């Protein structure tokens, strides 16, 4: 299998099951199987990165819709479903977190008369969803976090 991959992806030419051993190899791996302990010692293959600073400014969409849609919804993931469950999908982690949750800051929850356990309906011009609320200061005011665990992303 690794031979087939190496035929298609050149930087895998030095990788084999035997060379990987128990601890693996550090990428990139040379054709002779030598791995790279430190990637950039003296030079950068593509040159040094350029960092530019830009003053933060709120997006025009948020400015235009603040009155009708005062909260900012951010989708996220939960630790128990690592990387949208790409690695935890076949585990029993679904027994730990099995539902979607909406995290709401206490001030926003109080203003909207929401309590932990309530179901809130979120809507915008793009769609709507109803989610169980968790009131928490893990999120900033005006922001809500919509956790999408395994049951929704791969259900």
Image (cartoon, rainbow, N blue to C red):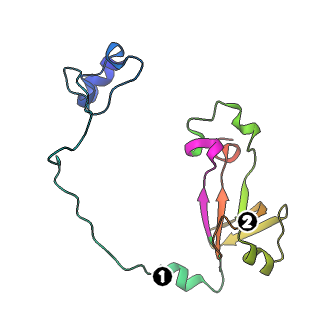
- For label 2, the residue is 136
**Between marks 1 and 2 in the image, the one whose residue lies nearer the viewer:** 2
- Label 1 CA crowd tier, 10 Å (few <14, some 14–19, many 20+): few
Report the magenta residues as a range.
73-83
Of residues 137 and 102, the one nearer the viewer is: 137
Residue 93 placement: quadrant: top right
Q: Residue at x 28, y 23 (%)?
A: 6
- For label 1, the residue is 60
- Going by the image, does 83 lie left or right of 127? left
Percent across and percent down for residue 103 are: 71, 63
Quote the CA–CA distance across marks 1 and 2: 28 Å
Classify 96 as above or below 14: below
Residue 14 placement: quadrant: top left
- Label 2 CA crowd tier, 10 Å (few <14, some 14–19, many 20+): some
Classify 5 as above or below 78: above
Classify 138 as above or below 27: below
Q: Residue at x 14, y 46 (%)?
A: 42
Label count reads 2
Asked if the magenta segment contains residue 15, the reply would be no
Q: Residue at x 42, y 18 (%)?
A: 22
């Amino acid at each position: 299998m690794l031979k087939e991959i190496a035929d298609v992806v050149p930087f895998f030419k030095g990788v084999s099951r035997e060379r990987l051993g128990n601890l693996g190899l550090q990428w990139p791996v040379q054709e002779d199987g030598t791995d790279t302990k430190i990637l950039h010692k003296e030079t950068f293959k593509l040159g040094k990165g350029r960092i530019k600073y830009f003053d933060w400014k709120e997006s025009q969409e948020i400015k235009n819709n603040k009155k009708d849609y005062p909260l900012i919804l951010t989708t996220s993931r939960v630790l128990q479903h690592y990387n949208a469950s790409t690695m935890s999908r076949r585990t029993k982690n679904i027994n730990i977190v099995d539902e979607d949750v909406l995290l709401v800051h206490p001030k926003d929850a109080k203003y909207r008369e929401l309590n932990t356990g309530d179901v809130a309906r979120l809507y915008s011009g793009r769609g709507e969803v109803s989610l169980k609320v968790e009131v928490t200061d893990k999120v900033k005011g005006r922001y809500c976090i919509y956790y999408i665990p395994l049951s929704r992303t791969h259900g």
